[in-house]
């Protein structure tokens, strides 16, 4: 690859090729002609302009072929995996100036096209020679730091078939610049690479072949050792039924990002028994059986086969008395303690239903969305505080929805729902 000076080096090399071609114009060449690298609107007026060819880089685009071949250069944690590179195509506008009555612009155009068609490749030898001459003339020149000659591919020049409309749009970008005879050339490819040093991995110590049968576990159902109306709490026993559940080395159950090692005496090919791990939040959660593979010497766990995710519903539980406090004019703050704790990004809704409304009347009902937890604070909270407004004073049954999972109400001696509840002043 090459460093960041390569774009300028291609321009300098193209100028060098055209400078050497100017004396080759049949008929003795064009007197005092030279090559410049200015914006076309910076050229002198027609009466006082110098004769010659102006090289202007007007567009830089990504090279599709090389960009598609560029692999990811960083690991997920941001560390460098390989030196990043960018493949570029350069578009040049060649402008020809001189005595129009003597057709000097057309004569120079002809020699420029002939030269770049006959020598379409920017050879490594030409680049090295250019750098050597520039360094001899000025030991401090920037060109001596270019390594364009060392890039994997060489630069090739191709004539671009710009029509009159495209040329008109291009020249319209130059402020009050009169049109001059012009052609465009395409230079590809320039491979830019940053001088980053990837962290090297240790060399391979031992080589070997590992063969293992692909036995992907499959879950048919998940059962909790609790009554159908009881919520799932940390420690509740889960029975996972299916096929090929026991792993060849170890068996793990992944639930809501938490992995639990299944004891050998609780694992068979058709059933696993594990407790619901602490740290699982309320909501619809997926249960997966994972079979890590032991690879290397000494053996280290690597990613292996995993089952499909089987859903379970982890309901929130109101873990204590529901309290109220003034929250401002006409605002009451209702605080509900919950198990399991609520996460920062979880959606919480507080539902209030009138407790034992008068016979024949529909009880009042309200729903309020809890404000999100502060991302800068703790990751979980043991209680949620919800400001409520417009609620008629009275006794209300309390339910909480966390990510769609709703807490359960408890009936009283009369068979109607009685707990948990709160008194709204």
Image (cartoon, rainbow, N blue to C red):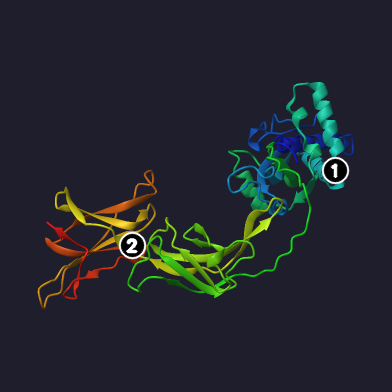
Is residue 22 visible to us here? no
In this orientation, which residue lies closer to the viewer: 84 or 380?
Answer: 380
Disc 2 designates what residue?
A: 316
Of tags 1 and 2, which is closer to the observer?
Answer: 2
| Nearer to me, 424 or 98 | 424
Which residue lies most toward the bottom here? 360
Q: Nearer the viewer, residue 311 or 109?
A: 311
Measured as percent of width and height from the top left, residue 401 is found at 31, 63
Q: Residues within 10 Å of mark 2 (few under 14, many from 20)?
A: many
Classify the position of the C terminus by image quarter: bottom left
Check disc 1 and report its element: helix, strand or loop: helix
N-terminal of the pair, mark 1 or mark 2, is 1
Please tell me whether residue 271 is drawn above or below residue 383 in the rendered image: below
Q: Is residue 66 above or below residue 253?
A: above
Residue at left offset 82%, top offset 31%: 130
Examine the rendered structure and indicate whether residue 108 appears above or below residue 417.
above
Q: Quadrant of residue 265?
A: bottom right
> In this rendering, would 327 be left or right of 314?
left
Judge left or right: residue 240 versus residue 196.
left
Q: Residues within 10 Å of mark 1 (few under 14, many from 20)?
A: some
As helix, strand or loop, the secondary structure at mark 2 comes to loop
Whether 332 is drawn above or below 228: the answer is above
The residue tagged 1 is: 115
């Amino acid at each position: 690859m090459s460093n960041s000076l390569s774009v300028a080096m291609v321009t300098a090399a193209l100028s060098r090729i055209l400078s050497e071609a100017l004396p080759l114009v049949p008929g003795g060449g064009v007197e005092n002609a030279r090559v410049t690298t200015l914006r076309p609107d910076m050229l002198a007026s027609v009466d006082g302009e110098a004769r010659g060819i102006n090289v202007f880089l007007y567009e830089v685009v990504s090279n599709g072929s090389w960009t598609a071949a560029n692999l990811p250069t960083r690991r997920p944690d941001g560390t460098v995996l390989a030196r990043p590179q960018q493949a570029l195509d350069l578009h040049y506008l060649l402008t020809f100036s001189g005595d129009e009555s003597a057709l000097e612009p057309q004569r120079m155009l002809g020699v420029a096209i002939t030269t770049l068609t006959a020598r379409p490749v920017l050879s490594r030898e030409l680049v090295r020679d250019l750098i050597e001459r520039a360094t001899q003339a000025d030991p401090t020149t920037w060109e001596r730091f270019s390594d364009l000659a060392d890039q994997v591919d060489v630069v090739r020049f191709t004539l671009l078939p710009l029509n009159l409309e495209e040329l008109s749009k291009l020249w319209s970008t130059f402020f009050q610049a009169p049109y001059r005879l012009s052609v465009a050339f395409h230079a590809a490819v320039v491979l830019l690479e940053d001088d980053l040093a990837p962290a090297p991995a240790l060399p391979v110590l031992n080589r070997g072949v590992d063969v293992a049968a692909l036995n992907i576990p499959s879950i048919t159902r998940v059962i909790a050792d609790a009554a159908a109306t009881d919520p799932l709490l940390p420690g509740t026993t889960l029975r996972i039924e299916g096929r090929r559940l026991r792993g060849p080395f170890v068996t793990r159950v992944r639930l809501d990002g938490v992995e639990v090692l299944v004891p050998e005496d609780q694992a068979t090919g058709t059933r696993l028994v594990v407790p619901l791990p602490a740290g699982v939040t309320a909501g619809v959660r997926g249960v997966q059986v994972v079979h890590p593979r032991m690879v290397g010497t000494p053996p280290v766990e690597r990613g292996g086969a995993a089952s499909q995710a089987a859903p379970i519903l982890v309901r929130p539980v109101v873990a204590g008395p529901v309290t109220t406090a003034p929250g401002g004019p006409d605002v009451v703050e209702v605080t509900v303690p919950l198990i399991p704790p609520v996460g920062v990004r979880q959606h919480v809704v507080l539902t209030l239903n009138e407790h034992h409304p008068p016979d024949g009347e529909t009880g009042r009902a309200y729903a309020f969305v809890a404000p999100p937890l502060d991302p800068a604070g703790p990751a979980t909270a043991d209680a949620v505080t919800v400001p409520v407004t417009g609620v008629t004073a009275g006794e209300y049954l309390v339910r909480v929805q966390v990510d769609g999972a709703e807490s359960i109400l408890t009936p009283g001696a009369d068979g109607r729902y009685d707990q948990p509840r709160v008194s709204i002043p």
